[in-house]
Amino acid sequence: MLTSYWICVTNEENWEVVKAKGIWGVSERRKRELMSVRPGDLLVFYVTPKRIGGVFRVISEPYIDREPIFIPVKSRDEVFEYRVRVEPVLLPKEPIDFTPLVEKLSFIKNKKYWTAPLRRAMLKISREDYEVIEEEIRRHL
């Protein structure tokens, strides 16, 4: 099966949860993207503001779990119940600056307003864009 590549957008607090628990989750509103994820897919974590936390591999099928392990972002009852289990693949000691990649990434069409595509929880990207990001992370390992 072919690997798919995704950017997952999270904040600092929930990035810590992903690393500690090995779980990524999204809300009901974003479940369509997560339900497309398969074991072996690679998730690049974009940690707001403007940083890359690392890359994780999906190691489970999507599932639903309402245990409140994530910090709510918009409303207190938000539990990000659509989840997958993940394991680290590339994990720099500290998140690295995303800004140098903007000009090189094809999924960012408008380079002036480059954060626009990153306002969702998940975004599928091309293998080429993934490789650009991976190369930048490897420079910081």
Image (cartoon, rainbow, N blue to C red):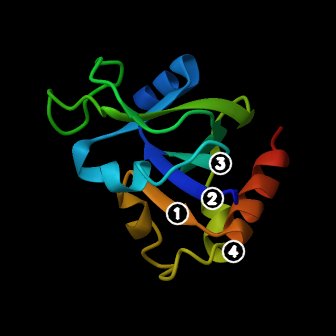
Report which residue position mark 2 lands on. 4
Residue at 52 percent across and 63 percent down: it is 124
CB under 8 Å between discs 1 and 2: yes
Say which of marks 1 and 4 sits in front. Answer: 1
Question: Camera-side residue: 57 or 113?
Answer: 57
Report which residue position mark 1 lands on. 124
> Helix or strand or loop: what does disc 2 sit on?
loop
| C-alpha gap between disc 1 and disc 4 | 16 Å
**Where does the C terminus fall, quadrant-wise?**
top right
Quarter of the image holding residue 27?
top left
First-in-chain label (3 vs 1): 3
Quarter of the image holding residue 66?
top left
Residue 33 percent location from the top left of the image: 40, 55
Tag 3: residue type? Leu
Report which residue position mark 4 lands on. 104
Residue 133 percent location from the top left of the image: 71, 58
Does residue 72 appear to the left or right of 61 in the view shown? left
Residue at 69 percent across and 31 percent down: it is 88
| C-alpha gap between disc 2 and disc 4 | 19 Å
Residue 46 percent location from the top left of the image: 53, 48
